[in-house]
Amino acid sequence: MADPSGAEADQQFVMLRTAMREKIFEYIGRKQSSSEWRWRLPKLAKRLEEVLYTKFPNKNDYYNMMKGPVEPQLQFAIKALSAQNQQIQQNLQMAREAASSYGTTTPDVNHGDIREQSATLPADDDVDRTGEIL
């Protein structure tokens, strides 16, 4: 599917998506009125709408979804986004565990037994923006 922000985007579909983001923003804004949430709402509304766009990728289905109440669609999007975030956290944790236990097993020439040699990964401060080690 073409990028909806591209020059050939269906303007009606773009308007539908913008309207859904506004609906989400207003709905959550009524439920969460704290100032902490206010600055997060635009980004959250965008991410939740993107979940719905993935579920309803054609204009007709998206339009039909918008005609109904926003709450069930929002519940689906929140659950999906939560599951995505949980998967990301699990992947990060597994990567951290793998990095901390990374090592190679080599025989100790002097004693004939097997010993663990740990590799040290560069700290974030030791890597520049291109990913090269300083």
Image: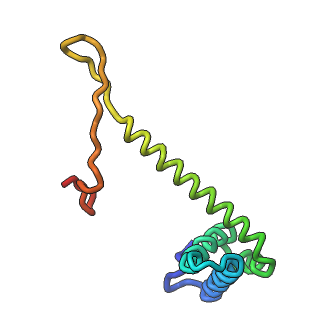
| Residue 61 image point, x, y percent | 74, 75
| Foreground residue among 61 and 36 | 36
The residue sitting at the right extreme is 68
Total marks placed? 0
| Residue 66 image point, x, y percent | 75, 80
Q: Quadrant of residue 57?
A: bottom right
The residue sitting at the front extreme is 34
Q: Quadrant of residue 22?
A: bottom right
Task: Assign the N terminus to one quadrant of the image.
Answer: bottom right
| Residue 111 image point, x, y percent | 22, 11
Residue at figure coordinates x 68%, y 67% from the top left: 77
| Foreground residue among 107 and 4 | 107
Residue at figure coordinates x 79%, y 81% from the top left: 67
Residue at figure coordinates x 66%, y 80% from the top left: 29
Q: Quadrant of residue 26?
A: bottom right
Q: Is 8 positioned to the left or the right of 99 in the image?
A: right
Relative vertical location of residue 106 with respect to residue 32 in this rendering, above or below: above
| Foreground residue among 60 and 128 | 128
